[in-house]
Amino acid sequence: MNIDTNVPFIFNIPNGEKGLVSKSPVEAIDIYPTLAELCGLEIPSHVDGQSIVPLLNEPALRMNRIVYTQWPIARQNYDRTIMGYSAKSVRFNYVEWIKMSTGETVARELYDHKVDPMETKNVVGENSYEEYTKFLAHKVSARIQETDHDHQFKNGRLHSY
């Protein structure tokens, strides 16, 4: 999942340093607050995400946060659609696969990037990872509860905007 959900997040700031790289996880929803801060604009309170200007100034900084990703499998057939929900920290990536038509969790995964950066070993059932699994599972559950699940593809219909 790590390979599937990682995308380049590149900012070119006038008079800023070039070629700096951060390992701290960020989300696409961080773009607007970041641009607003860079432009000296107030970030509206209703905006999700957070500015990553601190990372642009100090890439080695570790922002203590969880970032989220979700993506569907078999999107063309809602009754068969399984949604992947991921909660990722600097060290861990936790994923739950949920059948949308029933809400059933069909699989869970936990990867420890400290020892397995390529996510080749799922450690979700190992006792030494129980605390991390519970914490991140709670984060995924909370995120699912906050999410608008009208994914616009129920009954096999895709809506264009």
Image (tube, rainbow, N blue to C red):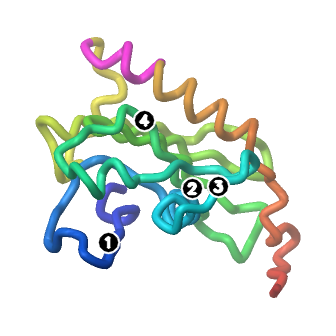
Q: In which quarter of the image is residue 122?
A: top left
Q: Quadrant of residue 145?
A: top right
Q: Mark 3 or mark 2: which comes first in sequence?
A: 3
Q: Mark 3 points at which residue?
A: 42
- Name the residue: 34% across, 73% down: 11
- Name the residue: 51% across, 65% down: 31
Q: In this view, does 40 lie to the left or right of 144?
A: left
Q: Give SS at disc 2.
A: strand
Q: What's the amino acid at mark 1?
A: Pro
Q: Name the residue under label 1.
A: 8
Foreground label between 3 and 4: 3
Q: Which of 88 and 36 is in front in this view?
A: 36
Q: Mark 4 points at which residue?
A: 65
Spatial CA span between label 3 and label 1:
26 Å
Q: Main secondary structure of the magenta part?
A: helix
Spatial CA span between label 1 and label 2:
17 Å
Q: Mark 4 or mark 1: which comes first in sequence?
A: 1
Q: What's the amino acid at mark 2?
A: Gln
Foreground label between 1 and 2: 1
Image height of 41 relative to 160, above or below = above
Cβ–Cβ under 8 Å for marks 3 and 1: no
Q: Residue 70 carries which label?
A: 2
Q: In which quarter of the image is the C terminus?
A: bottom right
